[in-house]
Amino acid sequence: MRLISMVHLRELRLVERGKHSMSGTAESRIGGIKAELRFRLRAKRMNDKKNTGRKTIAVNKRARFEYHIEERLEAGIALEGWEVKSLREGRVQFADSYVLLKDNEAFLFGCLINPLPTASTHITPDPLRTRKLLLHRREIDRLLGAVDRRGYSVIPTAMYWSRGKVKVEIGMAKGKRQHDKRKTEKDRDWERQKSRIMKRG
């Protein structure tokens, strides 16, 4: 986002360095530029705060390697209190999880959430329990249609905090062929090499 034009910026710098005198009109103009700059900076900070509302808990990297993700949806997830506390500490393994659609509902299987040592002794935590995903009926109907009629798989791709609540990103996906996987590996290796080159430079 350009906050002020380069002409305005140069003029502002010249005035502030005292390289030319400032008339009443120029002073008013510079004041307007400064006010606009402050306003846009304030708006940018507010926008940045909104963007930082999403904090990643876990990413399913295997899903990106094994599948072409064609469409993504955000789902809520029904959690117990000890699970929320564990997720705040990042005690989750997400790579082997998958989504099952049954009786017009969606469930997350295979997601391992390890309880904290301080978990209450009044409960018996089940780290691998099946957890219900919270979706609108029309979203579930779309997923069912994609699975039944078009041969898609539904897989979880990420878990994150959004406005204080845990969300799961799920994707409608199709499995990659072997040559697609090789291409993904080559692209990943090239990204690593570029990163090393940039660090050395």
Image (tube, grey):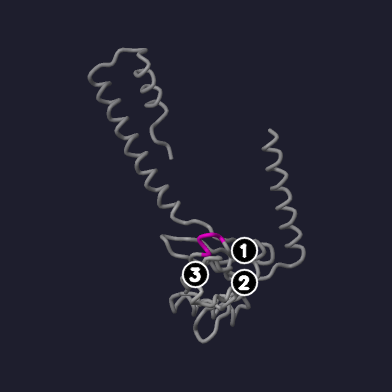
Q: Nearer the viewer, residue 198 or 76?
A: 76
Q: Are marks 2 and 1 in contact (CB under 8 Å)?
A: yes
Residue 189 pos. (x, y %): 74, 50
Q: Nearer the viewer, residue 44 or 161?
A: 161
Q: Secondary structure at mark 2?
A: loop
Q: The N terminus appears in which quarter of the rendering?
A: top left
Question: Gap in Å between the C-alphas at discs 2 and 3?
Answer: 19 Å
34 to the left or right of 133: left
- Looking at the rendered structure, the kind of residue marked 3 is Trp
Residue 152 highlighted magenta (yes or no): no
The correct choice, above or below, for 70 with respect to 200 in the image is: below
Q: What residue sits 40% from the left and 52% below the top?
A: 50
Q: The C terminus appears in which quarter of the rendering?
A: top right
The tag earlier along the polypeptide, 2 or 1, is 1
> Magenta stretch: dominant SS?
helix
Q: Secondary structure at mark 3?
A: helix
The tag earlier along the polypeptide, 3 or 1, is 1
**Quadrant in the rendering for residue 41:** top left
User: Which residue position is annotated with label 3?
Assistant: 82
Residue 88 highlighted magenta (yes or no): yes
Question: Gap in Å between the C-alphas at discs 3 and 1?
Answer: 22 Å
- Looking at the rendered structure, the kind of residue marked 1 is Asn
Question: Gap in Å between the C-alphas at discs 2 and 1?
Answer: 9 Å
Residue 60 got which mark? 1
Which region is colored magenta? 86-90
The correct choice, above or below, for 140 with respect to 37 in the image is: below
Q: What residue sits 56% from the left and 60% below the top?
A: 90
81 to the left or right of 97: left
